[in-house]
Image (tube, rainbow, N blue to C red):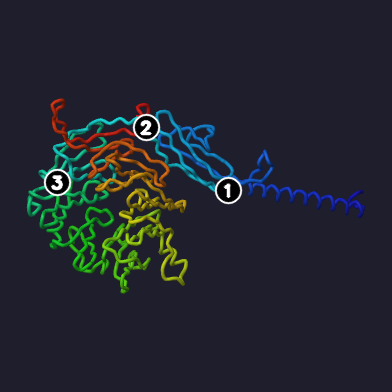
Amino acid sequence: MDYLDPKKKHEHKVRLLFGYSLFAVAIGFATLLLVYVANGYDVDRTTGQVIQNGLIYVNTRPGAADVYLNGQKQRGTTDARLVVPAGSYTVGLKRLGYRDWNRSILLEGGSLRRLTYPRLIPEKLTTTSVADLRSAPINSSQSIDRRWIVLSYDDRPLALDIFDTNQSTSSALIFQIPEKLVLSPTGGKIGILEWADDNKHFIASYTTATTVEYLFVNRENPSESQNLTTLFADPELQVQFQDRKQDKFFVYKPSTQTLFSATITGGVATVPSVTNVQAYKTFGSDWVLYITSSGKEGLVDARFKRGDKDILLKQIKTSGSYLLQLAKLGTAPIMGISSPLENRAIVYNDPEKYLNENPNVSTPIATTVLRVDNPIDLRISTDSSVILAYGGNSFASHEFDDDRSYNFKTNSAIDPGQELRWLDGQHFMFSQGGVQTMMDFDGSNMYDLAPSLLSLGSLYTQNFNNMYTFSLPIAATDATPATPARISITSLLTAADR
């Protein structure tokens, strides 16, 4: 029998070993091939060369837009997943009735580029009047959930207008802040400063020629509003919400440069949260980004305090004012600091984590530096995904998730007296020539929308499908009757998509 024949037995073992070896090689080759495929490697059918692909994921609002790469239309519509070789591309999006959207990107081999933020704007915008106003408002504010719009006026300053953006047609409802709350009920101006996260309470300043009072306003029951300046028994204190909670506050005393916490029932804390504070920005219940003296001539310290931990970020030039921004991305603190004299903003993503991972260093390394000449403001987007610095017609932004920075310019500067506002996480609004203008966070697309009062800008419905704007009254002429001040609404969708 063969299995008793030593020679045949040996040949059988050799055949088995050879078969096993071929099988192992095949498994190894297949595994390697899968690894290469998973990392985007492919073979160019034309040249036979090995290339590495990347993935572009594109979505739009509204959806069903045609996708173009370098001018070539792709299969299907958004949302689209495009596997293409690494390289430079111009991504174009087109949809009937909407303006084209375009952006140039560099796709690295094995990488994913997510373009999920494009917002398409109609070629023709439709604007209709919502309500006549008693005069031109001097201040506008919108609740955090974007449902409520509050307007204040020069005349009858304690009588505010409120609009519910959930109503398709709306008229101004007047709610009266009790006159007994303030020292002088006439001759002052109301500024709506900040909303609590219950979307029911807000802090307002009441400013006269000699005083500034901080009011805690209840929009549902104005009679329950309170004067925080009187409650905290110190006319010098500046007040803001702590963690956007309607019963907790941070109060700052300029003469002593001291920051305290306070509550409605307990008053101002006896122990300060931070001392020697020249400028500050808070987030949550115990995060404070602040400027303090450094002990060195011409320099100040920028520091970040979280709970009991207080770290030095950077020494920057002493300035008459500072730009500070602080927010949370996931669980990590993100922040930006700027002394405008330095023509830059320094950005950090979780500096505490960096110091914990590098115990031998005393200060964290910046995530990026945004270069802008004479910056006038620094803003973090509503979803904390982007930070933006700007001055004149120059902008610089940083996208935290992809760790990418951008520099871009507009043809002219933002109109004086108009502050930049974020529309959502990836688009911001400003005024140029009296027209509200929308721009992508990286400067790739800019759209003129509708005119509005510079001091008020534009506000939005909860789904961002509609924009509110404001107009001045127009005196009568021989040919036309007088027109009152108005709040109007502009749809950011075509008629077919509403």
How far apart are the alpha carbons under marks 1 and 3?
A: 59 Å
Pointer 2 local density, CA inside 10 Å: few below 14, some 14–19, many at least 20: many
Horizontal and vertical percent position of residue 164? 23, 38
| Drawn side of residue 366 relative to residue 302, left or right | right
| Drawn side of residue 495 relative to residue 188, left or right | right
N-term mark: 2 or 1: 1
Up/down of 481 relative to 255, above or below: above
| Drawn side of residue 390 relative to residue 116, left or right | left
Residue under label 2: 122
Q: Residue furthest top?
A: 479
Residue under label 1: 109
N-term mark: 1 or 3: 1
Count every numbered label the image shows and give the total.
Answer: 3
Kind of residue sitting beneath label 2: Pro
Tag nearer the camera, 3 or 2? 2
Tell me the residue at 56%/45% (across/down).
87
Kind of residue sitting beneath label 1: Gly
Residue under label 3: 222
